[in-house]
Each structure stands twice: as C-alpha cells, then as structure tokens.
Amino acid sequence: MSATARPSEMVPGLGRRIGSLRSERRWALWTAYISLIIAAVVMLAPPLYMLLTSIKTSAEIADPSGNPWLVLNPTWENYAGIIGNPMFRGFFYNSIILTVCVVVITMVISVLAAFALARMKFFGSQVLATGVFLTYLVPDTLLFIPLYQIVGGLGLLNSIWGLVLVYPTLTVPFCTWIMIGYFASIPKELDEAALIDGANWMQMLTKIFIPVALPGIIAATIFAFTVSWAAFVYPTAFITRPDEMPLTIGVVSQLIRGDTFAWGQLMAGALIAALPPVVVYAFLMDYYIAGLTAGATKG
Amino acid sequence: MAQVSLRKIVKEYEGGVQAVKGIDLEIADHEFVVLVGPSGCGKSTTLRMIAGLEEISAGEIDIGGAVVNDVPPRDRDIAMVFQNYALYPHMSVRENMAFGLMLRKFPKAEIDRRVNEAARILDIGMLLDRKPKALSGGQRQRVAMGRAIVRDPKVFLFDEPLSNLDAKLRVQMRTEIKKVHQTVRTTTIYVTHDQVEAMTLADRVVVMNHGVIEQVGPPQELYHHPRTRFVAGFIGSPAMNFIPAKVVERGNGLVLHLPLGTELAVPEHRVARYKAYAGKTVTFGIRPEHLTDTQNVNKPHVAIFNATPEVLEPMGMETLAHIKLGGAEICARLDPLVAASPGVPLPLAADMNNMHLIDDATGLVI
C-alpha cells in the first residue's frame, strides 16, 4: 500500500463512519429547521391574526361563515377609530410617561448598585448581590397585596406615580444582576489604570465603566422598558380611574362597552401598543450585539 | 523625578499568608530598577503596593521624600504600565493618553503638546486617532507607555509589560523601553520574571524569592558574584551548573571531588577562602561558558576532565553539550567546530577562576 493511500482505505469501516457523520449532521440541520419553523409559526400566528382582524370591518369579523385568515374588504377604519379616541391617546401618553420614568429610575439605581457590588468589595457585598437577585424571583402576583397596602398608605392609588414607585421592584433587581455581570467582565486593570490616572469612583463609573459596559446597559434598558411597558398585574390592581390607566389595562378595560367587544379596534389598539417595543428592539439591537470590549486588553 | 524607599514592607493576606516579608530597598532618582523572581515571589505585590493598588500590612513606602502609605494612587504621582496594557477600549489613542491629564484639568494646549511629544518619542503619531482594538500588540504596548510618559510622573511602574508579546517583538520593545528611559530619565521600577529582561534593562536588579530580597546589585555583579544559590541559578541562561562536590585537602592546596571520580584543583588564591570547608560536602557551581572544550585553553587555573555528552544542541555560534555527571545534569558550551558526538567521552576544561562553592546548609555562596 502506498503512503498516500487515503485513511478510509487503510482502516476498514472508516469510510462508512464518515458517511454516518454526514448523515448525522443532516439530521441535526433538519431537526433545527423543523423546530425553528414550528416555533416561528406558533409565535407569529397571534400577531398575524391580530393584524388581519384589525383591518376587517366589524361585520366581517362577526360573520361566522367566512375564513378568519382571509380579509375580503380591508379597511383602516379601526385604526382611525382608535387613534381618534382621546381615551386611547391618554393611555398611550400615560404608558410613555410611566415607562420613561421607570426606565430612568431603574437604570440609575441598578448601574450605581451594580458598580458598588461588582467593584467595591465591602462587608457582605457578595450576600447582597445574591440577595438582589433572589428578590427578583418573588412573583408580582404574590407582592401586589402588600404593595397595595403600601401604595394606598402613600395615597398613590389610582395614579401612575404609584406605578412609577412600584415597577422598579420588578426591574431593579434583574437589571442590577445584568449589570453586575457586565461590570465584573471589565478587566480589573482598567479601573486600576483609571485610578492611577487620577479618576475618583464617580469618574471611573461615568468615563470608563458606563461607556465600556454600554451593551449591558442597553440590554438592561430593553428589559426595564419591556417590563414596564407590558406590566399588567400591578396596574390592574392599583388603577381604576380610566384617565390614569396605561395602555395594557386601558385597552382591555375601557374599549369594551358592556358586552360589546369592538374586536377590530381592540386588535388595532393592541398592535399600536406593541409597536414601541418593536421599534426600541430594532434600533438598539445593533448596539446590543456590538462587542465594545474588544481590544481592551490583550485580545 | 524622585527616589523611592521601601522600609520593612510586609504584605500579609487574610489567613496569615505573607506575600512580602519585610523588604528594604532604596531606589535612587533616575534609576532603572528591575524586580525579578519566579511567579509568587512577591515582586508584583511589591510593585502594586508602591502604586497604592494594594494596602501595606506593615512598613513604610516613601516616594520623593514623603511617606505615601495612606496616599491614594492618584495622588502618588506615579504612572503604571500593565501586562495586558489596560487601554480604555472606547477611547482613541489620543484620548487614552490625554485621559490622566484631562482628569487633572491641564489646559488643552498643554495636553496636546505632551501627547504629541510622547507620540513622537514612541513613534505612534500616525495611530493617534485609532481605537485600541485596531492596534497590534506592540502598538498597544507603546500606547500604554505613552499614557505613562505624558503624565511626566515621579516614578514609572512596569508590571511585566512584555509578557504578552511574541519573542521577536519582546526584544524590540525591550530596546524601546531602554531608549525611552534614556530619554526621559524618570525613576523606573520594572517587574518581570524574565532574567534576560532584568539583565538587559536594569541599572540594578533586585532578585526576589519567597517574599524576600535575595540580592540587589548591578546585572554584572549579580552574574559574576551571586550571593546565594538561588541567585546563582536564576540569573544566566543556560543556568549555572550545580554539582555535588567534596572539598579535600591535598598538600597545601584543595581539590574538589566530583561524582564519577572527577577531580578538580582549586586555584591557590581561593584556598584560604574555602579552607574551612575541607572535608565537607558542598555544591560546586560553574557557568556553562566556563565549562568548555579544550581548544585554545591556555589560561591559568583550568582543570581538565573527561565527560560524556548525552545530548548535543548546535546553536550556530556554539554547541551546548548536556552531560550527566553522577546525579547532576550539567551543560557545557563547546566551539561549534569541535567534533563531539553523543556517547563519546570528551575532554572538558573548567575555568576554576570562575568557580563558586555553595554551602548546602545555608544556601549561601562561600
């Protein structure tokens, strides 16, 4: 046998093994594609159904004989109706104020907390860091009764400011946890270099840590935004006055007249409500993925 | 510019582990001092204590005439170059270098002047607007040095700055660092585990081991007159040969009994020095360059003996012969033209003028 013989010719059975490897890979690809397609269909069916319903007339929606996945007479009247509704615009405004306040409060608290927990080693900092995360594990369905007492005691029931106070209990622990992870991944030499360069703690945070951990900060911001924009349990419990309601509960509680469900408008309203998160994700995703720490140290 | 004094410096970690065990060191103004030793010897800890990045458990550090034990790093007027460069990834080279000056509220014109001057010294003028991730390892190291130079501090601290570079670049940057020091003359403390770096860069080398200073001195002094077995073995490459030997009196002189019946005569001018060890077992130390082939040997005090090389390593300008002598592995440097082959006995010449004897009990060179 010559020295250039292929390994598969020299070892009996090797050729077959390579073949089976290829087929295993094909299997993995097929499985991946099929499960991804199933997942995509399951995830996208409801919004698609909402979209289709929102461009139908009330008569078409109510007609049981038609195919619900087909639109015969597309119309924008539901969108015009919902946007023209001052109540809906009020909900939207409330949601924006609420979310902006919550995101700002959350990021200020969690960035400062995470910086302290990640870098200033003090007595109990480890326990505190774990404790922060554990509080996130308590579900809001369990907390809303005691929180109702607190918010009520402060006279903030039926006000979005009550929600501004309460939402950070959901967002701060998780955002702090994310930020601790990001800050911890910044090489220690970077703060030592800044320390020697003459930075104090605050300058180190604002000039080094925040810019370097920007992807983490954006991830945390997206999370705080999503939680605050989509929160349902707390506003349901704390807000009964329509003019203080955010979108999530406003749409479902106020746009239903008695037994009449204006499905077209409901779906249009829900889709418009879902738009801001989509826009935020689309814009921030690039930052989110960008590896800003590349080249910090030897890499 | 300033002198640095360490007085009885101790670093003790929780649990009573002492990384640095009370060292004393005086570093003169403009001096380039290299702390060298194996990993875990306390050299980096010492440097970090000088920088203010580690607390001092006991003792005093004095920079430029003021005790700085409780002074935060930013007020010590020092600059440090880290092993992994520690450049700020989101800032351009210019911003990286200007950062320390900006924090100290220097006027813009002065910052520009200093950055440009440092860029000129380090030849990185064309990189000023790049981000660190667009630089090669050597360029990053230059920027890290630039960041130190612009500050014009009292002391430069280098913490293994060349360890992340490949061998060729390391040699090049070593020259660069020496050149920079010759230009700016700032007192420099440099930590490395590489004895070649220590020898080539230092005005004085500080050899550390297990948290204590073994010896301080100019490179040549350490090389030719090591005080301890550790220094003798650590400085020099290939390392010094250590062979167990018995000192035996013969007539008025002394002879070393080596394994395999080899006998080497001690030069007369050293007899008085070693007389007290007659009859005792010591370690005989000799550098590979003092253990050569017998060509051109007409110096006095050369002892000739036969040995059998196990492995030969031709290096071009010389051939290293690895020899087993009893239990000891020794290395000799041969002329590349000498016809030697593994397994064939070869006459070797030991230059006994450059011999060392080490007291096994104390580890000190006699």
Image (cartoon, coloured by chain):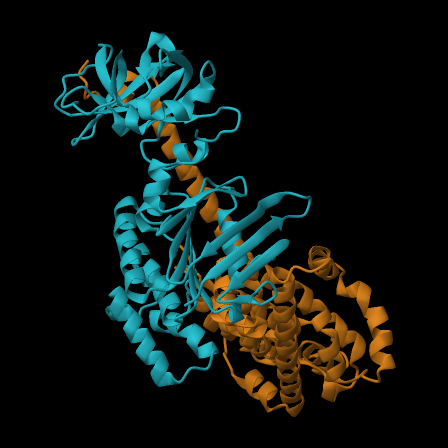
Chain colours: A orange, B cyan
Judge whether residue A223 can be spotted in this image. yes
Q: Quadrant of the N terminus of chain B?
A: bottom left
- Name of the residue lying farthest toward the top: B261
Residue visible at 48% across and 60% down? B4
Give the total of numbered labels. Answer: 0
In the rendered image, which quarter is residue B81 located in?
bottom left
Q: Is residue B52 visible in this depiction of the protein?
A: no
Q: Residue at x 18, y 19 (%)?
A: B294
In the rendered image of this protein, does residue B116 appear above or below residue A174?
Answer: below
Position of residue A107 relative to residue A123, above or below, is below
Please give left or right for residue A226 compared with residue B310 in the image: right
Q: Is residue B281 above or below residue B313?
A: above
Residue B152: where, in percent of width, then height?
39, 71
Left or right: B273 in relation to B170: right
Asked where in the image residue A227 lies, by quadrant, the reply is bottom right
Please tell me whether residue A164 is drawn above or below residue A208 in the rendered image: below
| Position in image of residue B70 (x %, y %) | 61, 65
Relative to the observer, which residue lies in front, A146 or B201? B201
Pick the residue in front: A178 or B23: B23
- Residue ranking furthest to the front: B252
Residue A222 rendering spot, x and y as whole percentages: 56, 69
Q: Which residue sits at x=58%, y=65%?
A: A46
Q: Quadrant of the C terminus of chain B?
A: top left
Position of residue A13 measured from the top left corner of the image (x, y, whole percent): 35, 18
Is residue A176 left or right of A5 when viewed as pictured? right
Task: Give the camera-side residue of A33 and B316.
Answer: B316
The residue drawn where x is 30% and y is 52% is: B174
